[in-house]
Amino acid sequence: MGDLARGDFGDDFTWGVAHAAYQVEGAWDADGKGPSIWDTFTHGKGRIRDHSTGDVACDFYHRSAEDTALVRELGFDAQRFSISWPRVLPEGTGRVNAKGLDFYDRVVDECLEAGVEPWVTLYHWDLPEALHQRGGWANRDVVGWFGEYVDVVAERLGDRVQDWMVFNEPCSFLLVGYLAGVHAPGVRSLRKFLAATHHVNLCQSVGASALRARIPDANVGTTHIITPPRTKQDRPKDRKARAAIDAFANRIFIEPNLGLGYPTEAAGLLRGIEKHLKPGDDDALKVDWDFLGVQYYQRQLVKPAPIPGLHAIPWMSKDHRRYEITAMGWEVQPDGLYEALAKVHAYDPDLRLVVTENGAAFPDRLEGGRVHDERRTAFYRAHLAEVRRAQADGIPVDGYFCWSLMDNFEWAEGYVPRFGLTHIDFATQQRTVKDSGRWFQRFLAATATATDAD
Ligand code: GCO
């Protein structure tokens, strides 16, 4: 891997960093913002590993200019951030909170002034609590509510923002929030999970249309986490197990928008989704994406399950002997990124792909003003090599976003796992660029091909 250089990825390749509203903004009730399901969830007892909340987080709400300047200093082209729906529409529909919208307007301008492209995600998991009280994603009315919200944002930011992602990882907030109940809103119901999944898929399409109606030259995509399942053996029942998890964790969130319907044949438990379909939905689901965002963290070890209709369960044990394990307990397998890209590419060879998230948490230590996180640098280098391999094999990948610019609120794990290129002291809000961030800075500054930044 000694030969990796920025220039090898192409002149039009976008290098970015990503983060999300609830994980970084703080200011949870400032300037007229309404509560989101994550405010409710974290303010309840016992949900978050370190009993923390996103009330303050990285205080990005007040420090966005400084953080955006850092994105530029490190040499990235783009900053991916998300809009908090209840900051813009405190009740979810109707009344617009001007100060909330002003904040995002400012962030966009700060990006442009710093020479950083703003890449905007419309939904990164913080549904207005008021809409959850009305049934949230499980209520089909959400399709109208979401269209209204996207229109408000597109009208205000569309003159300056070209790159849009409608959703961040439906798989995660639906499976973990509506089926496992470990993320907000903490629901455990197969029925609600299936209803919510169908409504989110409809919203992908409604959101994309609302963007295109306001912004003729918009670059419209969405993001999916791709977790390739693996089994220890390859017997027919192992293959069936992989297929079932693949349907549940990957395919139901991607295929309906590509006009392929729901893969109910692969997992019997999915059949319940059919009763949420109305005439005309098959067409309403179709989206003509400009790009798809692929987010990759790990492969998932699964094993055959003796549960009729399910076929597979995730296997929580780890292969410590074969793989390095991150602070999230995830196995480091760089070639899984290639597999994830190839999997999405197989749907449509012309569809542009962007790696909208990739990164890792490690037990970082701040010592003498430095964080020597060589494991993170090695992680990025190995994964970037897989992006190059995908490009070399003809897969059109034209961007890569690190998760994340800075340490932030990692959902149910609180502030324990640190994913940043920048360390944050959450008591003082002091930012310290880690060695991995400096590695990127050198890598991005070197324009020649085939010479490593090190
Ligand atoms: C996700 C989200 C991020 C996470 C990151 C690390 O992929 O789950 O987009 O919000 O923080 O992935 O788990």
Image (cartoon, rainbow, N blue to C red):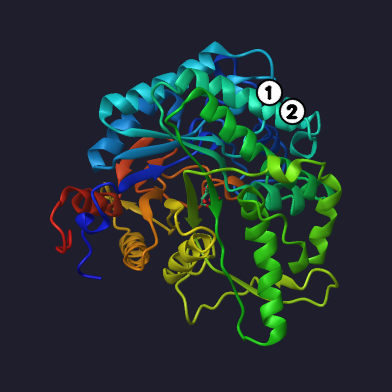
Q: Is residue 24 visible?
A: yes
- Quarter holding residue 59: top left
On residue 431, the disc is: none
Q: Position of residue 277 (x, y in %)?
A: 81, 45
On residue 131, the disc is: 2
Is tag 1's residue or tag 2's residue first in the polypeptide sequence? 1
The residue under the point 72% across, 56% down is 262
Q: Amino acid at mark 2?
A: Leu
Q: Amino acid at mark 1?
A: Gly
Q: Position of residue 9 (x, y in %)?
A: 27, 56
The residue under the point 33% across, 61% down is 384
In front here: 299 or 220?
220
Q: The residue tagged with tag 2: helix, strand or loop?
A: helix
Quadrant into which the C terminus falls: bottom left
Q: Position of residue 274 (x, y in %)?
A: 83, 52
The residue under the point 67% across, 51% down is 256
Residue 446 against residue 148 in the figure, above or below: below
Q: Is residue 405 visible?
A: no
In front here: 126 or 376?
126
Residue 365 against residue 29 in the figure, above or below: below
Kindly report the distance in space between the C-alpha atoms of the residues bearing marks 1 and 2: 6 Å
Label 2: how many Cα within 10 Å (few below 14, some 14–19, many 20+): many
- Quarter holding residue 77: top left
Q: In this figure, which residue is indicated by the disc labeled 1?
A: 92
Left or right: where 281 falls relative to 433: right
Contact between labelled residues 2 and 1, with CB atoms less than 8 Å apart:
yes
Q: The residue tagged with tag 1: helix, strand or loop?
A: loop
Residue 305 against residue 271 in the figure, above or below: below
Q: How many marks?
A: 2
Quadrant into which the N terminus falls: bottom left
Left or right: where 291 falls relative to 288: left
